[in-house]
Image: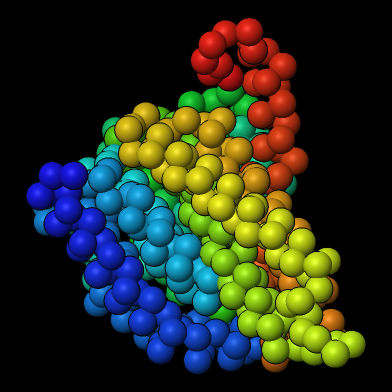
Amino acid sequence: MTQMAERLDTDAQELLEVVADFCRTKIAPRAQSIDETAEFFPDLLAQAADIGLQGLIFDDDGKVDPSMLSLAHETTELVASYSGAVALGISIARLHGYLLATYAPDDVRRRWLPGLIDGSARGSFALSEPHSGTDIRAGKTVATTVDAETFSITGEKAWITQSPQADFCIVLTKLDSKDRGAATAAFVVPFDTPGVTIGKDEPMSGFRGMPMANVHFDNCLVPAAWRLNVDGFRGMLEGLNLARLDAGCYGVGFMRAALRETSEYVRNREAFGRTLADLQIVQEKLGHMYADYLAARGLLRDGVDSFARGGGGDAHLISAAKMFAGDAAMRHTIEAVQLHGGYGVHLHYPVQRLMRDAKIIQIIDGTSEIHALMLGRAAARADWSKAEVNA
């Protein structure tokens, strides 16, 4: 290892220690109340920004530093092991910042990126619609050309995370037509723009405390200068791949928390004259949980590395990582609840919250079923006789 590499490794470890302390002293005491009350937590996001978490993947000039993506996702896992909602709030700031730093015109980037990094601004990612989630091409939100300098956006976006507390959104639209094959664009739209309306905050079973609502656009006039410099569909898919990596990291964080909470519980819970930790069936369950945690973590590291190399990453690898982590998190948080017995379904014990949060991972950013379908289609077409298969 070179001296520079050693220094970078030391810096990363020091940051992870700071984040771990932030999680234990600031997030952990609040995680239960955030879940129970579903109250937003701007103070925790501000403290995370002070540590540098939202700006971790950007250099001093506001450009994306791909070498920092791996460390950023390690911090996401760590924060998620204490609160999925807080982890989501931090990582979506990086997601919006990534798209702005990569594709936004200079004026738009300068307006919003510094605030995302320092925590003074918040965005949302307006992709899904009431009748089109995974099937992005079925969207009906349209940006109609008014003149060379202006578009009019009309449509509705659904399940838009953080929109009730956000300052702007990055919205995917079709151009001048609702046809499935119509050209697409992505715009950065401030929420104080006339014609934009935020719906009511939708109560969810998981990631409580992170607000979510529909966003309505009614003849919303936007300058052409707010358009991202990328085909909307391609840009959103790149953002979606980053969001899928984040989602997988939440799942790994939930498994980490399940291991932490359950191992402590079984070490102290006695039955039939010995602790639950002494029972082979309990050891077997924890062994499978630990193995899947390590496997999911490894898949996600490979997925993050592929994204860092550019081009939006290896879509199949990222799909596999997100799907595996989400499904494993669901499976093992259920197991954690079971191992806790009656305490597992008590609202004051965190494992039931982990279970509810884990279920969300199987749905957001493409359901587990659609990821399995895409991977299965690729696997069926691949030549598995080759020494190195690239499905």
Residue 348 sits above or below residue 141 on the image: below
Residue 369 sits above or below residue 252 on the image: above
Q: Is residue 106 left or right of residue 199?
A: left
Looking at the rendered structure, the number of numbered marks drawn on it comes to 0
Which residue is painted at 68% across and 76% down in the image?
262
Q: Quadrant of residue 304?
A: top left
Of residue 37 and residue 218, the one placed in the foreground of this image is 37
Instruction: Name the image colouring.
Output: rainbow
Q: Is residue 271 left or right of residue 125?
A: right
Q: Is residue 272 left or right of residue 264?
A: right
Residue 148 is situated, as x and y percent measured from the top left of the image, at 29, 33
Q: Quadrant of residue 386?
A: top right
Which residue is painted at 53% across and 71% down in the image?
81
Image quadrant in which the N terminus is located: top left
Which residue is painted at 58% across and 38% down in the image?
319
Q: Is residue 121 visible?
A: no
Q: Quadrant of residue 92?
A: bottom left
Q: Residue furthest right?
A: 272
Which residue is painted at 55% across and 84% down in the image?
31
Q: Is residue 324 visible?
A: yes
Image quadrant in which the C terminus is located: top right
Residue 383 is situated, as x and y percent measured from the top left of the image, at 63, 9
Residue 36 is situated, as x and y percent measured from the top left of the image, at 65, 88
Of residue 205 and residue 105, the one placed in the foreground of this image is 205
Residue 26 is situated, as x and y percent measured from the top left of the image, at 41, 87
